């Protein structure tokens, strides 16, 4: 599943607290999360692993 979180870049905490500004939302198509068509195998071991998905 691929997920995204809203970006609050450029929005002050006061604006967020007062409801005056909302973080920018990011939409991920269902085929990449709830109805995912993506798959990969993750190997065990130490160290950082990077897996890139070509999202069309």
Image (tube, rainbow, N blue to C red):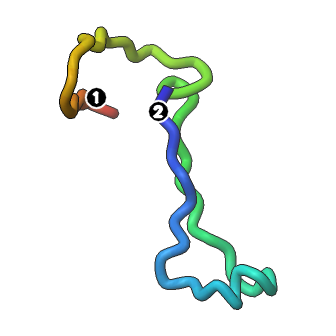
Q: CA distance from mark 2 to mark 1?
A: 10 Å
Task: Looking at the picture, tell me which residue is in the foreground, 45 or 55.
Answer: 45
The quarter of the rendered structure image containing the C terminus is top left
> Which residue does the image show at 56% across and 60% down from the upper left?
6
**Looking at the image, which residue is at 51% across and 39% down?**
3
The crowd level at tag 2 (other Cα within 10 Å; few <14, some 14-19, many 20+) is: few
Examine the rendered structure and indicate whether residue 56 appears above or below residue 40: below
Q: Is residue 34 left or right of residue 56?
A: right
Q: Is residue 53 above or below residue 25?
A: above
The residue to which callout 2 is attached is 2
Q: Identify the residue at horizontal 50%, vertical 18% (top origin).
A: 36
State the residue position of label 1.
53
Badge 2 marks a residue whose secondary structure is loop
Q: Is residue 24 above or below residue 30?
A: below
**With respect to residue 13, does 34 lie above or below?**
above
Residue 38, horizontal then vertical, whole percent = 39, 17
């Amino acid at each position: 599943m691929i997920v995204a979180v809203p970006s609050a870049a450029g929005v002050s905490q006061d604006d967020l607290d007062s409801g005056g500004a909302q973080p920018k939302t990011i939409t991920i198509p269902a085929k990449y999360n709830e109805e995912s068509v993506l798959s990969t195998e993750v190997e065990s071991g130490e160290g950082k692993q990077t897996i890139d998905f070509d999202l069309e």
